[in-house]
Structures are given as structure tokens and as C-alpha cells.
Amino acid sequence: MDYIFVAQLFFALVLIYQLVTWLRSRLRVGDYDKKHVLVTGCGNGFGYLVAKRLDVLGFRVFAACRTSQAAEKLQEESSSRVTTLVLDVTDEKSISAARDFVAARLPEGQGLWGVVNNAAIAGPNAPSEWVSRDGYQACLAVNLLGLIDVTRTFLPLVRRARGRVVNISSLAGRIAVGPSPYCVTKYGVEAFSDCLRREVYRQGVHVCIIEPGLFKTNINKQDILFKSFKMSYDATPADIRQHYPEFTVEAMCKMITRASAIFSPKLHLVVDAYVLALTSRFPPTRQLVGSDVRLFYRLLWNLPTPLTDWILVKLLESAAH
């Protein structure tokens, strides 16, 4: 009987904690019009939508795009509260120039309320053995090293405002589902964010992680994924490919088509998570976004590893046939 009471007490405390945390996260900061936020990767996808949403809410937004064409297009579509700039997160000089650009346009003595590290690429779509060192480095340069460099460079401005750093991770940062270069970068984002959060704990800076499931964005378009796979397939010797009978051109075409069918078009859910991280007085440390990651994948990463491996291998095999 005592064990039953302890179990009930434990679950009651967990529920109370979750409820209090949820209620606290719904308390909002004020004066959006006096808060400046930098968002990377605004040329399309989540970054573009976040910049537009923050503009509507009244934030002062520095929207960083990879190309001048994307920056010009977004500027034309936005109000005067949005200032676009060109930023290559893989280039330290470009990041330093962006820092100087932003600092020169902030009101005297004011810092950045938020840095949103949204820029990301899918990377090579192929088995690990097929991906070259350059393939891994290209993905790391944007998704992880670029995120780290942007954060380090802009952190003094964030600290001045006692603001927050918001980093985009993925379900692939919790469980390795998908191509290994992408997963490696997202595991790295999780580790960097955890380290940074504890290091700036006493500095008034919040570090938030967004962990979306599978959403229909430009980086996972069918043609892009298939082209990436075909390039790796053609570059891999036949004596290596023979060990991966499930990764044929025909099988991968089926897998990509079936995967695309389950990608969620509800991009606003991820945008909502970004906005909550920037507007809440007590922002959640992590936000799992999407029913797939909150239910199915969350269960998978808590199962015994051999069982998780068996389930994922079976899913891969079924998708290829």
C-alpha cells in the first residue's frame, strides 16, 4: 500500500510541476516594439515565417538571409521594423560584419533581446560510409559551427539585454533518425546549447532549444533529397554499395516519396515555438514540436536501445518495399 501511495504522490508532483511550468511559460514580456531580434536563415522556411511573425507582433527584426536576392525580397514584403542583411554563417568575416551592422543600428546602450539560430541544411542524404569528409564538413559548417560562431559573436549583445539564444535542433538531435551528417550536427546543437545554458545561467541569458519533428520545408523537398542521394550513390564504389541492398535508387525513391507524405505542413507550430521562446518571461528550455516527435519518437528514444534499433530497421525496410 505504501508503494502505491508513493507512486501516486510521484505522479501528482510531476503533473503539478508540468502544470506550473506551462502556466509560467504563458506569462509574456512586454514592450515588443523596443526589443531587437536577430534571425538567421530568413530566405525561406521557418526563418522567413518567424521574421514575418515577429514583424506583425511589433519586434524590431534583423533578418539575415544567405543571398542578397532573398534579403531584398523579404525587405519588400515587410514593414520598416524589419532590417534585412546578408549573412553567411559559414564565414567568420561575414558573421563579424553582421555583428557590426547590427550593433551600429541598436539604440545606444541597448542589446539584442534574441538571437535565433535558424539557418540549417539537410546535408548529404546517404548511408554514413558513402558520405565523404567534405560532405560531413559542409553540413557541420552550417548547422553546428555556424550556429556556434553566430552565438559566440553576438552573445555580448544578448547579455547586455539579458535576452535569449534560441537554437534550432530536431528530433534527430535526440534520436538518430535520418542521414548521419544531419544527425551529428543536431546532436552537437543539443550539447552546445546545454553547455551554454549552464555557463550563462547567472548572467540572465536564457538558452532555448526548438526540437521539431518532420515538417514540409525546403530542405527536405523530394527532388533535393533524391538528388543528394543520387550524387552519393554514383560516387560510391559498387563493392561498397553491395553491402547496402536496401539503398538502391528505386528503393530510395520510394522511401523519399513515402516520407514526404507524412511530413507535416503545419509550419506555424514551429513558428509558435520560436515566438514562445522570445516572448515568454520564463521560456521553456526545450520544445518538442509536432505530434510525431511528442509521441512516437519520444517513446522510441526511451525504449531499450536494441528494441529501438529493431523498430527503426524494420521501418526502413518496409519503406523501401
Image (cartoon, rainbow, N blue to C red):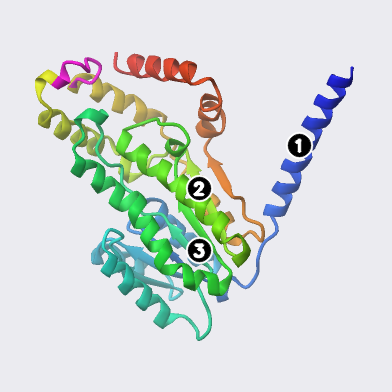
Point out the residue furthest to the right here.
1
Tell me the number on the disc at residue 75.
Answer: none
Tell me how far mark 1 sits from mark 3, CA to CA: 32 Å
Which quarter of the rendering shows the C terminus?
top left
Which quarter of the rendering shows the N terminus?
top right
Give the mark count: 3
**Disc 3 designates what residue?**
54
SS of the residue at dot 1?
A: helix
In the image, 20 versus 265, the foreground residue is: 20
Which amino acid, mark 2? Ile
Dot 3 alpha-carbon crowd within 10 angstroms: few under 14, some 14 to 19, many 20 or more: many
Q: Is residue 239 left or right of residue 39?
A: left
- Magenta-drawn stretch contains 246: yes
Residue 158 seen in the figure: yes
Task: Specify start and end residues of the magenta stretch as a single range.
Answer: 240-248
In the image, 36 versus 184, the foreground residue is: 184
**Disc 2 designates what residue?**
210
